[in-house]
Amino acid sequence: MFKKITKIFIFLLFLGFLIKSPSFVFSQTAELDQEIKNLNSQIEGQRKQLESIQNQQKQYASLIKKKEQEQSSLKDQLEILDDRASMVELEIEGVKLEVSKNNLETKKIAIDIDNNNKIIEKEKNHISNLLKLLYKQNKTTPIEIILLNNSLTDFINQVKYLENTNDELNKSLTSLKELKEQLEKQEGILKTKEKKLQELKAELEKKQIILQGELESKEFLLDETKRSEQEYKKLLELAKREQDKAASEISELERTVRAKIAERQKVGDKDVNIFSDSGFVWPVTKNVITATFHDPSYPFRRSIGEHSGVDIRSAQGNTLKAAASGYVARVKFNGTTAYSYIMIIHGDGYSTVYGHVSGVNVKEDDYVIQGQIIGKTGGAPRTIGAGAFSTGPHLHFEIRKDGIPIDPEPLLP
């Protein structure tokens, strides 16, 4: 009997300790506090640097806009290219800072997750001890409890301990649930940060490619004009003439070829294929778009005209494929450096144009299927099919609806 009394007494002392010193309260070490404080300080510092870079970008954008409104000259064009290159360099620096800031935030979240995991583990152990204690207490009958206590006061105190144990268990379970929810939220944020990091790295690669293009543009202009304003004007006139001629041909052919197809279908020509594609595919391997549709930052938009398609980065001589099935309406290719392109007519009023081609695998009136090889990409200065103002290897790609150029990006997968 004495051993049993001693055993219960020890349990009661243990219970009192649990209630007086709840294990769910977790105090971070000074070292951990300092690490988080340092991370927050670094994150705030990089946020301020990003704001400074964004303000500088606005200044360059204002300078570019001002220059674009002035009369086009070689000097102005070179200054625009310089300012654009400086702005892209700032954008690259900004993305690098974003990457660094994202890494710091990820590290801070990882510390929080590790911290919460430790608290959860401690809380689980605490709950386990409480359950063990309740289990052992419940095995003692009310008669045994009365007999084992010297007075009614001792009995009441023991009952109170049991009630407190239940309260403590409920609090611990609530705390554990809140910690688990917080942990799940932090893990979700961490996954978002990791995805953001991948996007930032892709953005950084894109900016570096664009910067390379800006530097190539300047180098091309300097090389072609030898800083001569007269040579620049000649180059400008040639490029404008090439673009206007291509635009006129494309518009006229759009109407002519569609009328021809409609006539053949009307008389029941079985050789007329049906356009059955559900959409468009990338004409070259999916890559960085260096100039968007009607790109406001396109450096030659004032001197030559609006950018009627997208420029897709592609190495010289890469395989070029039909974005959709259709009839080849035009193959402008004569083996010289003059602007070369392929135009294909599709169903539902769509047509596509592939510019700066350095080789062709089709001829006019051919029917091609989606993904079929139709030629090779080009665009490097002074190469076959590049045209007067192409400053680097790429594909100029247009999608037209009822003869009018539209933005290709939303229609590409």
Image (cartoon, rainbow, N blue to C red):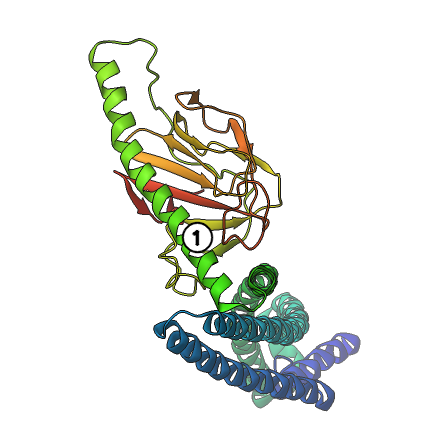
Left or right, 267 with respect to 62, comes to left
Mark 1 falls on what kind of element?
helix
Q: Nearer the viewer, residue 371 or 170?
A: 371
78 sits to left or right of 28: left
For residue 68, above or below residue 345: below
- The answer to whether any part of residue 257 appears in the image is yes
- Mark 1, Cα crowd under 10 Å, few <14 / some 14-19 / many 20+, is many
> Residue reaching furthest right?
3
Task: Point out the residue furthest to the left here.
Answer: 266
Is 378 or 188 nearer to us in this picture?
Answer: 378
Residue occupying the point 44% across, 23% down? 368
Q: Residue at x 55, y 55 (%)?
A: 391
Q: Amino acid at mark 1?
A: Ala
Q: How many marks?
A: 1
* Residue 254 on image: x %, y %: 29, 33
Q: Quadrant of the N terminus?
A: bottom right
Q: Is residue 24 above or below residue 135?
A: below
Q: Nearer the viewer, residue 230 or 68?
A: 230
Residue 166 at least partly seen: no
Q: Residue at x 28, y 9 (%)?
A: 269
Question: Where does the C terminus fall, quadrant-wise?
Answer: top left
Please state the horizontal and vertical placement of residue 359, each as a whole percent of the image.
56, 33
Residue at mark 1: 239
Q: Quadrant of residue 120?
A: bottom right
Q: Is residue 15 left or right of residue 229?
A: right
Residue 61 placed where, x, y %? 43, 76
Quarter occupied by residue 41:
bottom right
Left or right of 78, for residue 26: right
The relative height of residue 120 versus residue 18 in the rendered view (above or below) is: above
